[in-house]
């Protein structure tokens, strides 16, 4: 089960992640309710993955990175209608650290009472991955 301090990404962790990947935080809109989705860019996905793998990346930074990576994948799938080449790797990170990313994964899998056309574009790929994964 996810701890309360990881249920939602913290603004401090967003600032830390952006700084660590070399982004001037004043270039991103941090005054937004959904900053964990509005402050990331698909073009930075490889930087998110690299930071995620570093030993000194905190669980709070990983929580933000999970949102960033999932949002990037979702944007890619929405635009390209195919899986991103790094998608499998991201799914492995998020599920291996499920205790950190449970809320994000569940959010992307909210499909009750929705037609498939109303799902997040990434949802079907998460479900497919989970159906063949050793993590679930």
Image (spheres, rainbow, N blue to C red):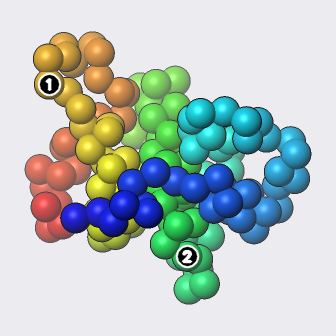
Residue drawn 73% across and 41% down? 30
Q: Earlier in the sequence, mark 2 or mark 1?
A: 2
Pointer 2: residues within 10 angstroms few (<14), some, or many (20+)? few
Q: Position of residue 6 (x, y in %)?
A: 42, 61
Instruction: Measure how far apart labels 2 and 1 are at the Cα level.
Output: 33 Å
Q: In the rendered view, tell whether residue 35 sits above or below residue 130.
A: above
Q: Position of residue 114 (x, y in %)?
A: 19, 16
Q: Quadrant of the C terminus?
A: bottom left
Occupied quadrant, residue 19: bottom right
Residue drawn 50% across and 40% down? 71
Q: Position of residue 94 (x, y in %)?
A: 36, 61
Label at residue 112 = 1
Left or right: residue 71 versus residue 136 is right
Left or right: residue 87 versus residue 44 is left
Q: Position of residue 20 (x, y in %)?
A: 75, 68
* Residue on which disc 2 sits: 58
Pointer 1: residues within 10 angstroms few (<14), some, or many (20+)? few
């Amino acid at each position: 089960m996810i701890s309360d301090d990881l249920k939602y990404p913290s603004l401090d962790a967003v600032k830390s992640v952006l700084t660590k990947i070399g982004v001037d935080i004043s270039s991103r809109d941090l005054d937004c309710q959904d900053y964990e989705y509005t402050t990331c860019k698909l073009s930075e996905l490889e930087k998110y993955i690299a930071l995620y793998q570093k030993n000194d990346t905190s669980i709070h930074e990983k929580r933000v990175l999970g949102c960033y990576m999932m949002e990037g994948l979702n944007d890619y799938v929405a635009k390209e209608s195919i899986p991103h080449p790094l998608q499998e790797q991201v799914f492995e990170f998020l599920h291996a650290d499920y205790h950190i990313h449970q809320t994000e994964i569940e959010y992307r899998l909210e499909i009750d009472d929705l037609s498939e056309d109303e799902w997040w574009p990434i949802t079907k790929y998460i479900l497919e991955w989970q159906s063949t994964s050793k993590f679930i």
